Amino acid sequence: MAQSKPQNVFAPWDDPNEVPLIRFRNVTKRFGTFTAIDSLDLDIYRKEFFALLGPSGCGKTTLMRMLAGFETPSEGKITVDDVDVGPIPPNKRPVNMMFQSYALFPHLTVEDNIAFGLKRSKMSRDEITARVTEMLRLTRLEKFARRKPHQISGGQRQRVALARSLAKAPKLLLLDEPLGALDRKLREDTQFELMDIQEKTGTTFVIVTHDQEEAMTVASRVAVMDHGRIVQVDTPAGIYETPNSVYVADFIGDVNIIEGNASPAGEGRVSIHYAEGAQPIIAAADHIPDGQRVSFAIRPEKIVVGTEPDPDRTNQVRGRIVDIGYLGNVSTYHLELPGGQKFSAQMTNARRLARRDFTWDDEVWLSWTETAGVVLTE
Amino acid sequence: MNLRRLLLIAIPYLWLLGLFLVPFLIVLKISLSDTAVAIPPYTPTLDLSGGWASIKEFFGQLDFENFIWLTQDELYWRSYLSSLQIAAVSTFITLLVGYPVAYGMAQSPDEWRPTLMMLVILPFWTSFLIRVYAWIGILANEGFLNQFLLWTGIIDMPLQIMNTTTAVYIGIVYTYLPFMILPIYATLEKMDGALIEAAEDLGCSRLSAFWLVTLPLSRPGIIAGCFLVFIPVIGEFVIPSLLGGSRTLMIGKVLWEEFFSNRDWPVASAVAVVLLILLIVPIVLFQRNQQRQQEASQ
């Protein structure tokens, strides 16, 4: 879950003077009776690598197609550089798209594919040749310039599609599940390549993906979508560490969720009563009314598993190990709390396996600090 | 090679040998013979009872006289030329009519396509001959078309369409249209719609996207459709003889007349042999196109 850039270097969304490149204002899109996008507001800034993340059917592709001009909003306004793009057809927009299927022209060579958009503009022949060469170099495709799309590999096709969509130097590049067709190893390499190219060209990227790991890796900000609405927009770290709802917490990574009733426990803290007779969970939270039904979400890796309770951590809960998933570098412990709740915890295997002092069916202590989890009211 | 494999391969070859090569050799032999008032109406006939000497004598009597005759009477080469011309022009018209139909079918919603496909194939359910006769009823001087035009007042004299080349073109285009539509539809239908969106995204108008992407990608279908129309139209006999009257020259009609009116089997066979040689060129080209298309799709 690497963060692409340190927050203090690039965070135009925190700067009130910064003008967004793209503005969605109250945008709604309906297909017949189905509402794909539901009165949505969104700002995307220059040079951002913005990820739209969500399950299939959440409206992320519709959102992107509206930016490209293939769909028009039923209501509301989309502006790019303060220009309302509603009436502008796709061929007149300063926006290019990299298609999920790549949509390379099978009858044209790699270089002709890249030159396709340039030939529609008023560029001279020499300029086009120079630009194509530059794009081939950027995507390391020089050797394949004369090949047809069916004569190159999937990864190379993906790079051709990227080069073609970048060739016209668009203000905004849209990427529709760009890495979906690649195998895992290639996908990871390509993610870093994409970030590299995005930084080099300084283009604003908007990527649509259902792969949360991909969104976390490449994006400067992630918008988590559900049912045509944006649930949360934040940096990858923000989304992961401080999700604003159970939906987001559950969608990104693994999480333990415990429901209970909150009661104030001093300044900036609440205690959550989740089971009869169990010690309440103490967690950092503000503005939670007394007796409010809340969900406490905590990531497995924030929990320490030990034979003794950890005295440095406020929360200490007994649990029984049901199962251990050994992944080499880490182990995932599936535990059962006395109240019957299922819990999972993840620990780095700092010691060798043989020296671990607990195993299946052992009673252990789970400990975590006040700030390890988040209290969610949605 | 084991026996089973040999047998498997032998069946199509035997089929071709028995039903194509042997009949062709018989026609070739007749084309080298002379006319005779006899049954069959040509000499020589092969008589194996005379032994080696009679076989030698048989081959000695064969000559190329009929082929030389074809070059001497201008009727024949003019018929060949006229057939080629009619085939080329009607293939072009069929393409002009068929492409938009195929395009419209490929653009239509998924649930409509089987119905539209059915409508294209539907005419095949009626006998070809009956459909051509139906055109006589439409195109004749007192036919539906002229009656309608007279009734609307657009014309005050019936148009002479029957027994002209125009009627032949109408008949051919009508009859062969499905052979043009289906292969073009097949290529258009499997085309990825994202390609057109990509073209528009890169700055193409709808029209230039069609010109630069759709049309080149449907080329294999266009070529296949053109050959599927062109090849059979060259030898077409029924349409020109029913709709074209005596003034339309087509080699199929000449062939029929040589066989059945003149009973000159040797000359008719020579006409058929030349026609076959003429057709081999486009057939080979067609095969090559199909092969290239298969390689490209792999």
Image (spheres, coloured by chain):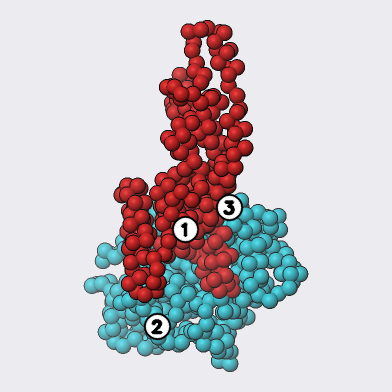
Chain colours: A cyan, B red
Residue occupied by mark 3: A150
User: How far is the residue under mark 1 from the one under mark 3?
Assistant: 45 Å
Asked which quadrant contains residue B57, the reply is top right
* Above-or-below relation of A354 to A261: above
Discs 2, 1: same chain? no
Please determine if labels 3 and 2 lie on a single subunit: yes
Amino acid type, callout 2:
Ser
Q: Chain of mark 1?
A: B
Return the residue found at the far bottom. A17
Q: Which residue is mark 2?
A: A74
Q: Nearer the viewer, mark 2 or mark 1?
A: 1
Task: Identify the residue shown where x is 53% and y is 72%.
Answer: B206
The residue identified by callout 1 is: B166
Left or right, B167 with respect to B63, comes to: left
Residue at the spot x=48%, y=74% of the render?
A: A70
Label 2 chain ID:
A
User: What amino acid type should be assigned to the residue bearing mark 3?
Assistant: His
The local crowd at label 2, few if under 14, some if 14 to 19, many if 20 or more residues have their Cα within 10 Å, is some
In space, the residues marked 2 and 1 are separated at their CA atoms by 52 Å
